[in-house]
Image: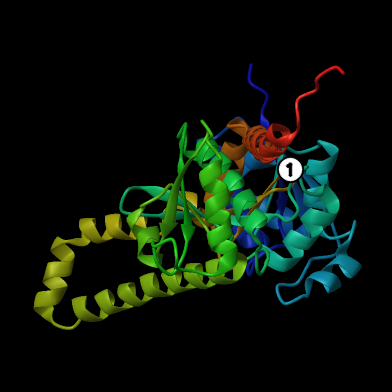
Amino acid sequence: MVEPVRIALDAMGGDFGPSVVIPGAAQFLERKPDSTFIIYGDSEKIAECMAPYANLRAASKVIHSKVAVGMADKPSQALRAGRRVSSMWMAIEAVKTGAAHCAVSAGNTGALMAMSKVCLHTMAQIERPALAAIWPTLRGRSIVLDVGATIGADAQHYVDLSMMGAAMARALFGIERPTVGLLNVGVEEVKGVEEVKTASRLLQQIDSPLFSYHGFVEGDDIGRGTSDVVVTEGFTGNIALKTAEGTARQISAYLRQELTGSWINKLGALIARGAFRQLKARLTPRETSGAVLLGLDGVVIKGHGGIDSNGFSGAIEIAHGMVRRGLLEKVRDMMALAEQQVNAQRAHDDSAQDAPAQAERPLATGQ
């Protein structure tokens, strides 16, 4: 019998707290009954929200926490006030101790990243974690990272992001050799900042059976799904993410305005309502409701702050999938293979540099 996936929930995270987290967990449990929950937060509020969900009560353990991290709290402030006592920290710590396989929170992004890094630490060979989003595209879905965990990147960090993103694509999408593209201002080799161009040269040297380097991609390639993984640093990635979300809302608002502008338009909207429902589902699919904190020695999922219960259910589903598909093991395998490739290339380069010097030495005569 397969062991249930133990999931730790920060019930107080996000704009709506338990009123979203608890119904979301109940929805998810209907789809994936091979799960149990440890729910951290205000026990009275949680019990009130759980009252209608007998199955969830049976599959859950509630642990009271008197401290909730605020959405406006600075990461340093959240660490000082919430370390070891907040619902967010306790959910993360459950992963560290092995009480849970993964943690899900819709709380403050900066605080969640800071607490996760302090509590879980990063994997070996990874200096900084990343926030990876699942992006709907014309081809299906892509992984985009970093979308806001850390600002700025050197060439090696871009390479690390590429490895982690490819590992996530293998775990989530089941792609044996996903393609990786570096987000740039053009696809020509001469374009872009020096760190991105250097990272491209490094990635070209890695001949990996676990991923394929596509090259540079531009902003409009993200929605096309040109590559399975799109890599950028957190400042640019967060702007791209917020721009895409805002554009989707803008188009939806335009459609509503036009479709209610006259009785003929209303009739057309009524006829096409099935198509509009499908469009909405494609623009806001359940499986894109959470972002993965990659590079940590544990699985932590960040749900959007304003998420609804259906979206939080989707964030839990991502966490469940990352555990079942062995995300951490795939990241470790990817990083180890990349290190082997880099070390082999360095050894080859060193031997090539030593060869001329060896050739110039006079042969020993024995006299």
The quarter holding residue 250 reads bottom left
Which one is nearer the viewer's eye here, 64 or 289? 289
Mark 1 secondary-structure assignment: loop
> Left or right: where does residue 281 sit relative to residue 69?
left
Which one is nearer the viewer's eye here, 11 or 245? 245
The x, y position of residue 276, in whole percent, is 25, 61
Which one is nearer the viewer's eye here, 281 or 179? 179
The x, y position of residue 209, in whole percent, is 51, 30
Query: What residue would you read off at disc 1?
Result: 298
Residue at x 45%, y 34% (from the top left corner): 175
330 in relation to 268, above or below: above
**Does residue 59 appear in the picture of this structure?**
no
139 in relation to 220, above or below: above
**Does residue 68 appear in the picture of this structure?**
yes
Looking at the rendered image, the quarter that the N terminus falls into is: top right
> Left or right: where does residue 211 sit relative to residue 225?
right
The quarter holding residue 262 reads bottom left
The x, y position of residue 308, in whole percent, is 53, 61
Residue sticking out furthest to the front:
367
Looking at the rendered image, the quarter that the C terminus falls into is: top right
Which one is nearer the viewer's eye here, 109 or 122? 122
The x, y position of residue 64, in whole percent, is 84, 54
Q: How many marks?
A: 1
Residue at x 65%, y 68% (from the top left corner): 152
- The amino acid type of the residue labelled 1 equals Gly
What colouring method underlies this structural image? rainbow
The quarter holding residue 261 reads bottom left
341 in relation to 248, above or below: above
Residue sticking out furthest to the left:
264
Residue sticking out furthest to the bottom:
261
Callout 1: few (<14), some (14-19), or many (20+) C-alpha neighbours within 10 Å? many
Residue at x 40%, y 49% (from the top left corner): 227
